[in-house]
C-alpha cells in the first residue's frame, strides 16, 4: 500500500519507487495469512482427538473447512482468496469500473482494431486508452444471458470460464493491482465472520442501486442493512 500511495503522489516519476517495496508487501501479506492457515491446521488436528466427544463445541470457519481438505498452505491461501463469492461480487460491481493508461511511445496493440476488434490498432504517443471493466464483465458471450444476476455458482458452469482478459477486476498485465490477494482475503474473512456472528442480514433500503464513481465506485445511497445476532 505504501508503494501504491507513492505512485499516486509522484505520478510520472513512479518508476523511481524501488521494487523491493512491492516484494516486501507481498511477503507481509503472505506471512499474515499463513499465520491463520497454520492455526487452522493445528485446530483440525486437535479436533480429530475429540471426535468421540459430542459435548465439545466445535465452531467452524472457512479456514478450518479448507484445512480438512488439504494441508497445502498455498492451496488453502488461494482458496481463501477466491472464496466467499468475492469473484461474483466484483464481476457485477467492480471497485474500479474503468481504468486508463497513456501511451508513452508509439505503440501497436495486437487487438482492438477492425470491425470485429480482432485487428491490430495503432496508439500514438500520448494516446489515453480506457478499459471498462463494468461493461467487460457483462459480456453475455462469456457470462451468459443473465449477466445482471448474482449467481456465485456461475463459475462452476462449463460455459463460464473467463480468461484473465475477460474478467479483470484488478486490472491485468505488469501494471495490475499489486494487492488483490490482500483485498480478497479481507473480504472473505469479513463475510465468514458475519456468517458466524449473525443469523440474518436484511436490507433496510428499498431504493435501487445508484452508482457513484470517484476514485472507486460505490452505491451513492450507502449500505443500509440490519443484522440479527445468532
Image (cartoon, grey):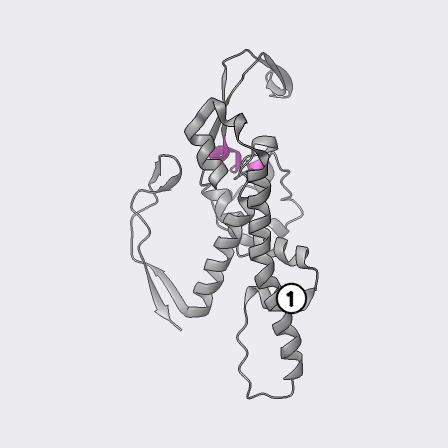
Residue at image x 45%, y 25%?
11
x then y, percent, for residue 121: 60, 15
x then y, percent, for residue 158: 67, 47
Q: Residues within 10 Å of mark 1 (few under 14, many from 20)?
A: many
Residue at image x 51%, y 56%?
188
Residue 166 placement, left or right of 216:
right
Residue at image x 30%, y 42%?
220
Q: Nearer the viewer, residue 196 or 152?
A: 196
Residue 117 in sight from this viewpoint: yes
Q: Is residue 178 above or below residue 42?
A: above
x then y, percent, for residue 193: 46, 64
Residue 167 in sight from this viewpoint: no
Residue at image x 43%, y 64%?
194
Q: What is the span of residues highlighted in magenta in the rendered image?
A: 132-141
The quadrant in which residue 210 appears is top left
Q: Label 1, secondary structure: give it.
A: helix
Dominant SS in magenta? helix
Quarter in which the C terminus is drawn? bottom left
Check residue 76 for magenta coloring. no
Amino acid at each position: 500500500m505504501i508503494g501504491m500511495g507513492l505512485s499516486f503522489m509522484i505520478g510520472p516519476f513512479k518508476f523511481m519507487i524501488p521494487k523491493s517495496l512491492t516484494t516486501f508487501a507481498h511477503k507481509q501479506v503472505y506471512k499474515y495469512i499463513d499465520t491463520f492457515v497454520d492455526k487452522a491446521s493445528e485446530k483440525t488436528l486437535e479436533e480429530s482427538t475429540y471426535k468421540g466427544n459430542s459435548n465439545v463445541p466445535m465452531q467452524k470457519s472457512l479456514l478450518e473447512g479448507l484445512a480438512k481438505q488439504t494441508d497445502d498452505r498455498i492451496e488453502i491461501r488461494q482458496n481463501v482468496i477466491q472464496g466467499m463469492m468475492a469473484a461474483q461480487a466484483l464481476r457485477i460491481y467492480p471497485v474500479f469500473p474503468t481504468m486508463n493508461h497513456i501511451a508513452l511511445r508509439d505503440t501497436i496493440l495486437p487487438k482492438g482494431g477492425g470491425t470485429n476488434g480482432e485487428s491490430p490498432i495503432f496508439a500514438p504517443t500520448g494516446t489515453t486508452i480506457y478499459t471498462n471493466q463494468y461493461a467487460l464483465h457483462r459480456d453475455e458471450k462469456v457470462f451468459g444471458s443473465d449477466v445482471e444476476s448474482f449467481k456465485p455458482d456461475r463459475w462452476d458452469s462449463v460455459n463460464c470460464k473467463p480468461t484473465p482478459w475477460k474478467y479483470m477486476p484488478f486490472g491485468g498485465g505488469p501494471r495490475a493491482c499489486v494487492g488483490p490477494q490482500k483485498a480478497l482475503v479481507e473480504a472473505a474473512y469479513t463475510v465468514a465472520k458475519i456468517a458466524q456472528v449473525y443469523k440474518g442480514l436484511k436490507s433496510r433500503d428499498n431504493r435501487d442501486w445508484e452508482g457513484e464513481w470517484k476514485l472507486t465506485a460505490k452505491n451513492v445511497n450507502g449500505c443500509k442493512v440490519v443484522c440479527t445476532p445468532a
